[in-house]
Amino acid sequence: MNASRSNPFWYLLLLLGALVMLFPLWWMTVVSLMSETQAKQSMGSGELLPVPRSLEWGNYADAMREVGTDPWSGFLDALANSIVVTVLVVLGTILSSSMVATAFARIRFRGRNGLFLVMLATMMLPAQVTMIPLFLLFRGLGWVDTLLPLVVPAFFGSAFFIFMYRQFIAQIPEALFEAARIDGCGWLEIWWRIVLPLCRPVTAITAVFTFIFVWNDFMTPLIYLHSEEQATIAVALNSFRTQFGGIEDVHLLMALSVITMIPCIVLFFAAQKQFIEGLGAGAVKG
Amino acid sequence: MKSVTGFIQVCIILIAILLTLWAFSRVAVREMGRLFQNSSEQVELVVMHWAGGGGQQEDQIVEDSLRAFEEQNPGIVVKRINPGDSGQYFTKLQTMMAAGDPPDVFYMDFSRMPAFVGAGQLEPLDQVVPVEDFFTPTVDAFRWDGTRQGRGPLYGVPKDFTTLGFYYNKSLFDRAGLAYPSDDWTWSEFIAAARTIGSLDPGTTGAEIVTWDFVLRAMLWTEGTDILDAEGRLVLDDPALHATLERLRSWRFDEEDTLLGAEAEGLDPSSLFLTGRLGMVGPFGRWVVPSYREIPSTDEGGFEWDFAPLPRGTRQANTIATVSWALASKSRHPEEARKLLAWLVGPQTQAAQSRLGLAIPTLGAVARSDAFIDPTVPPFNDQAYLDAVEYARVTDWPLDREFSLQFSRWMDLTLRSNRDLDQSLEGFELWWERKQASPLSGQDFAPMPWGVLLTGLLLLLAILVLVLWMRRSPSSASTARRSEERSGFLLVLPWLAGFLIFMAGPIILSLVLALSRWNGLGPLSTAEFVGLGNFNRIFIEDQTFWQSLKVTGYYVLLAVPLGQVFALLVALLLNARLRGIEFFRAAFYLPSVLAGVGMSILFIWVFKSEGGMVNTVLAPVLSPLGLEPPEWFNRDAAWFGVPAFALMNLWLIGGSMMIYLAGLRNIPAELYEAAAIDGAGSLRRFTSITLPMLGPVLLFNGIMALIGSFQVFTQAFIMTGGGPGDDTRFYVLYLYSKAFELYDMGYASALAWLLLVVVLLLTVLVMKTSRRFVHYEGLRQ
């Protein structure tokens, strides 16, 4: 199957598929650049290959200004919240998951295998089972309508990434660990000075996938964040949709949707290697 | 070339760092402000409201009147909260009340008021303002005597109201040679006009009638019928009721171009009027006026429009939709809060709000002044809204909030999906009978024995610790060994603590809650123990549960095989050493990293029945066969709603695809070489080498897709909201609405537990049966 092909038929299939996959995104961008009148017309009549008559870059500014109730601040709040949550969750997941994985991979302690199996089993749990009690817990703590419920759990490790780190750490030569221990390093030090630097590939994968997941997550912020100033970008976009869901605002809606996607698109092209190899590393080699 | 990409990379990293720094400082400043506020001796009041169609303008008006109030009352500071739309508003309000820290003065809509009075959260307001200056029906809407609305103490002072009617396109009426509607026009005049306009040219449609619960009730009243009798009991056997609903269905489905139906497709129906190709739209209240005032005049390429009240059938009828300012019974400054409330419903604020055009002032004097009756801007028929008050009344609903929700759902089945009316009515009636007969609806239960449960749990834990203690190995182990043990525990601790706090504990609590009835408003101690009552109701009485299970099952059956086959095929295509393969890989993968709210919004338009991307492509393909493309989320939603989501899923399978690709790369090339020497064709090589070698990967992806498919939420929430009827009510959507919209926490916990059981059972089943045909040898080495 690895034989190189230059079959034109193969290219045609690929080209067709790629076209279908990218078409909606291209179309969304085109509509986001249309004037209100043209967007309304085009959407109403079902034009398949619309071409904007003029490039209305102002749509983007208009859409951002109209988010929330105070001009601009609604959007800026949402953007800041999303960035803060995403960065903290990425950091938390990397630190906690690599630390726990070190123990699971390298340290002998009683109950290790049992705990590891329990951890693997938790990957099968649908998150909805814990949704209500967690809400009650965070409500009891007074954390509802703050960013804390979104951020704090990340610092307690994520089963999937712990597993991924463990697989990687298990392959690090034992000699390194022994040398460190002979030098009198404790395990925390070993984790910080040996495991973390060596695990850079896994860390990159973890960062990239956690970023995408958190940035796009909608249900958790929907449950916990009620005020506008606490909203993440996904929630803000949903509120925007309820307010500007009409056909006369479709150009703005599309513009804002494009804006919310930009960070993920940039990350995707910047970290293609991690995206391509990441999931394979977790699932296939495991 | 290299230096250019390097430069771009540096730029991106720099921008990312700057953005992060900015974001953290912005959030930090805000949160610090929250922590250190409120140190002065001033009285601080909190006001909460939502912004409807008025958006930022409504904020400005509330803000202005609050500042004016502060100026007149030195020593009082008022803080304003606006959580967004009314849905989020009530979630936030309930959460604040449950935490014992409600806002002092806040918006309250009349249909939710009884529930809040029942929970002891609202303060009676009879002495706050002279109610005789207000339109009486609007005030009566906020009276509640414990059983019925309209009498008893006053719990909210109406800030504005609206009656309903149709907005019509004057320019289209002119073109069709029709007279404009009069103030007492009839339904026959209405439909005659709709038919004439619909047949003007292929682009025009006669009208759009929305069928929201309270709108539908008002339309029934115009024919002298209703679904509730004078005592508030559900009665559905009136022939006039059948005739009215059947007529509505027939207008939409038996005639071309008379009525439009795009509401269920995630579009705001009021906005369809703006295209200028729709003759009439409604029944709407005043709330659409600000956006309709943006319509350019005929000279500027737009059209003229006006308002006509709800047409009459056998009688004239109308409904009053109204929102009030209410006062929290737990307000810490009741005196000041009363003063503020009186100011907020006073003439100045009402006049300002009225100029925005959003709603009608509740003070008679303001409503009749030029703040409301303004002959210079449309609608010119302002008087009609006020005249309708004479014969309008407030929509009364049973206390159970699910009643109106279910009413909408069942009626949608007929009015949106063209299902048989008798079946829908019977279904609704049966649902209500069962709900009322259920012991969970009336009966009192013993409180949850939290003390016993807690003691039991602690005892169990103690036994567990004891057993572990006894089983620990003798202390002969070396100190080095023991210190390693300690480090191991220390490093695992974050996960272990997280597991106990965020996973094990909640799962147990969830199971306990599943045996309870609890509305989530009060503390946990108010939960009642109902045994298996919730499960009993789920299995025997709850049709929505079975429906959501059916929808989810249908989706799983479609999306898992379809998605996996597609992902595998694409992976095979991409596993070629071709020039430019990186581009194709990125193209197939990119949409999946964008799966979120934005993607769902985009796909509303992809699957739109008319003018949607899919149907524009399908129409020319299907028309030679004499077929029409389906109305995915509308008329044909029962069969095509779920498949639309399964198709959308194909854009989001990048993850599975990459895993397959990695699996394919891991297959040793020698195997193919050996097979080629043996003369195996490419199909044979696929079935004998590729598939078996991919076994474990297939299993992994399959299980992940299975688990994921049971948890569909965002797409459905954004694109259909579960409608029309319950045609796309995915399980988690139902669970969410039970928990966070209806606050039925016990019942929702039971639903969550059932989901867990179903997913676990299926996973185990798949794993067990897979043993027979999944080979691991390829990966073991």
Image: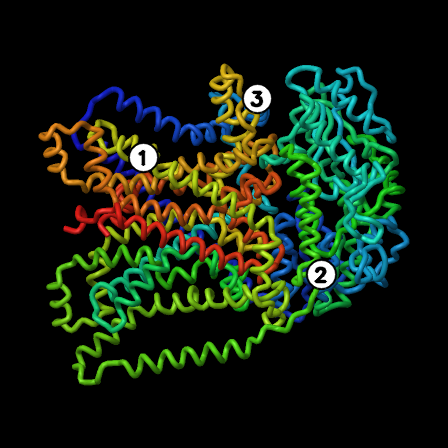
Quadrant in the picture for residue B505: bottom left
Residue under disc 1 on the same chain as residue under disc 2: yes
C-alpha separation, residue under disc 1 versus residue under disc 3: 32 Å
What's the residue type where badge 2 is placed? Phe
Residue under disc 3 on the same chain as residue under disc 2: no
Does dot 2 land on a helix, a strand or a loop?
helix
C-alpha separation, residue under disc 1 versus residue under disc 2: 53 Å
What's the residue type where badge 1 is placed? Ala
**Image x and y of residue B339, in percent:** 79, 62
- Closest to the observer, B127 or A43: A43
C-alpha separation, residue under disc 3 versus residue under disc 2: 46 Å
Report in which chain the residue with disc 1 lies: B
Q: Residue at x 85, y 45 (%)?
A: B366
Question: Counting other residues with Cα less than 10 Å from the Cα at mark 1, is it few (<14), some (14-19), or many (20 or more)?
Answer: some
Report in which chain the residue with disc 3 lies: A
Residue A27 lies, with reference to residue B428, above or below; the image says: above
Circle 2 is placed at which residue position? B116
**Image x and y of residue B167, in percent:** 75, 30
Report in which chain the residue with disc 2 lies: B
Quadrant for the N terminus of chain B, please.
Answer: top left
Circle 1 is placed at which residue position? B586
**Image x and y of residue B392, in percent:** 85, 43
Residue A45: mark = 3
Question: Counting other residues with Cα less than 10 Å from the Cα at mark 2, is it few (<14), some (14-19), or many (20 or more)?
Answer: some
Residue under disc 1 on the same chain as residue under disc 3: no
